[in-house]
Amino acid sequence: MKSKQITAGILSLAIGLTSAGMAMAAPAANGAQSAAKTQSAPAKKTDKPTAPAQKVTDPALIKSLNHETAIPLLVDAEKRYFYALSGGTGTGGEMETFTENGKEYRYLFADIDTKDELLKYLMKSYTKQASEFFIKKFIIVHEGRLAQLNADTGNLLEFGRATAKMISMTPTKRVYKINVPFPKEIKESSKYIMVKFEKVGDYWRVDTAPQLIF
């Protein structure tokens, strides 16, 4: 009788140890599987693609002004400034000149030979106020026609390679500090120019008189 009791006790102990071992092995196996999944799972990409630089196809239609779009607007403003200083484009015939107070003047060509036409041309890049400053400084009226000194001018600064840093802003006005380099072959430091911009209707315009920039 005692032998049977001892045998039954041994069997119970063996079954208990086996169950405990299986219970301990299950979490370990689950942990190993979780670790394997963690190691094999691909890392999630968190880097967002860099936004491409804004392309300006028409500087007269810039609705969002920033350090990138300010430069194409300035390049266009420079072009319009020197075009107006050159008197416009002739449609045939020679440039008409006259002398007044010992200085030689020339009449503007037909495409910008009225104040309305000249303002319309300049205001594709400038505010009306900045355009008026240009006209007041460089244009005279002679015998009912617009004229200017018969002299050409230029600028070595390369606004196409310039960079801009915003100094102040409101919803309709901005001020940028423009860093403009000279041509690479000229050993000169870049020039810094403060330029004001203003939103006119839906589009941005240069609000600094061109002669103060270029």
Image (cartoon, rainbow, N blue to C red):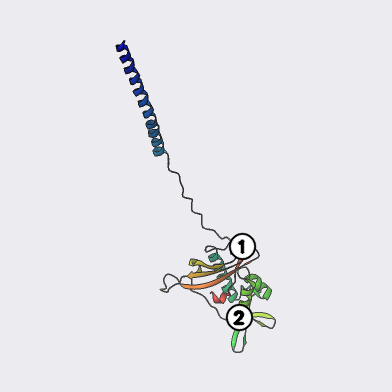
Q: As drawn, is 19 to the left or to the right of 205?
A: left
Q: Position of residue 152 (x, y in %)?
A: 55, 78
Label 1 to label 2: alpha-carbon separation: 27 Å
Query: In which quadrant will I find the N terminus?
Result: top left
The spot of residue 53 in percent (x, y) is 51, 58
The label on residue 61 is: 1
| Label 2: few (<14), some (14–19) or many (≥20) C-alpha neighbours in 10 Å | few
Residue pushed farthest bottom?
101
Q: Tell me which residue sits at (60%, 74%) in the image.
A: 84
What amino acid is at disc 2?
Lys
Q: Quadrant of residue 82?
A: bottom right
Which label number is shown at residue 3?
A: none
Say which residue appears at 47% left-offset and 73% top-offset. 191
Q: Secondary structure at mark 2?
A: helix
- With 38 as the anchor, is 113 left or right in this view? right
Residue 111 seen: no
Residue 44: image quadrant is top left
Vertically, is 149 above or below 123? below
The residue shown at (39%, 29%) is: 26
Relative image position of residue 55 (x, y in whole percent): 54, 59
Q: Secondary structure at mark 1?
A: helix
Of 35 and 2, nearer the camera is: 2
Question: For the residue carrying disc 1, how many other residues have a C-alpha within 10 Å: few (<14), some (14-19), or many (20+)?
Answer: some
The residue at which mark 2 appears reads as: 137
Q: Position of residue 119 (x, y in %)?
A: 65, 73
Furthest-front residue in this view: 2
Q: Earlier in the sequence, mark 1 or mark 2?
A: 1
Task: Count up the numbered dots.
Answer: 2
* Residue type highlighted by circle 1: Leu
Q: Would residue 73 appear left or right of 114 to someone viewing this image?
A: left
